[in-house]
Amino acid sequence: MPICRECKDEVDRLVSVKVAGKAVKLCADCADRAREGAEIAEASEAVIQGMMGYKGRR
């Protein structure tokens, strides 16, 4: 049985997700939370860049 690297539980199947530029194999629940966290971080970064008037690319 594979083990999730986030919650350390045994699961039937692991999902590969990019976290901080690295691919990590997580269970479905942890993968959803990691995706949500990445979306929130991306949105907050865009808001900060908009407030600062940043016009370049990331």
Image: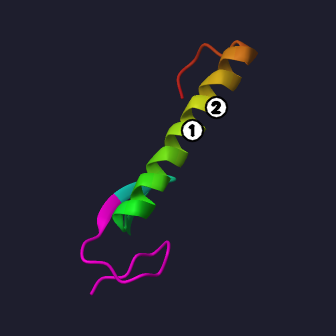
Q: Which residue is mark 2?
A: 44
Say which residue appears at 73% left-offset and 16% top-offset. 51
Q: Which residues are magenta?
A: 1-16
Q: Is residue 11 magenta?
A: yes
Residue 31 image position (x, y, % from top left): 40, 58
Amino acid type of the residue that numbered disc 2 sits on in the rendered structure: Ser
Contact, mark 2 vs mark 1 (Cβ under 8 Å): yes
Q: Is residue 39 above or below residue 24?
A: above
Q: Is residue 56 above or below residue 35?
A: above
26 or 29: nearer the viewer: 29
Measure how far apart labels 2 and 1 are at the Cα level: 6 Å
Q: Count neighbours of disc 2 (C-alpha within 10 A) and say few if under 14, some if 14 to 19, many if 20 or more.
A: few
Residue 36 image position (x, y, % from top left): 49, 45
Residue 10 image position (x, y, % from top left): 36, 83
* Label 2 secondary element: helix
Q: Which residue is mark 1?
A: 40
57 or 12: nearer the viewer: 12
The outermost residue toward the bottom is 1
Say which residue appears at 44% left-offset and 62% top-offset. 30
Q: Is residue 46 above or below residue 6?
A: above
Say which residue appears at 27% left-offset and 87% top-offset. 1
Residue 47 is drawn in which quadrant? Answer: top right
* Label 1 secondary element: helix
Tell me how many marks there are. Answer: 2
Amino acid type of the residue that numbered disc 1 sits on in the rendered structure: Ile
Residue 2 image position (x, y, % from top left): 30, 82
Q: Quadrant of the C terminus?
A: top right
Horizontal side of residue 48 vs 34, given as left or right: right
36 or 51: nearer the viewer: 36
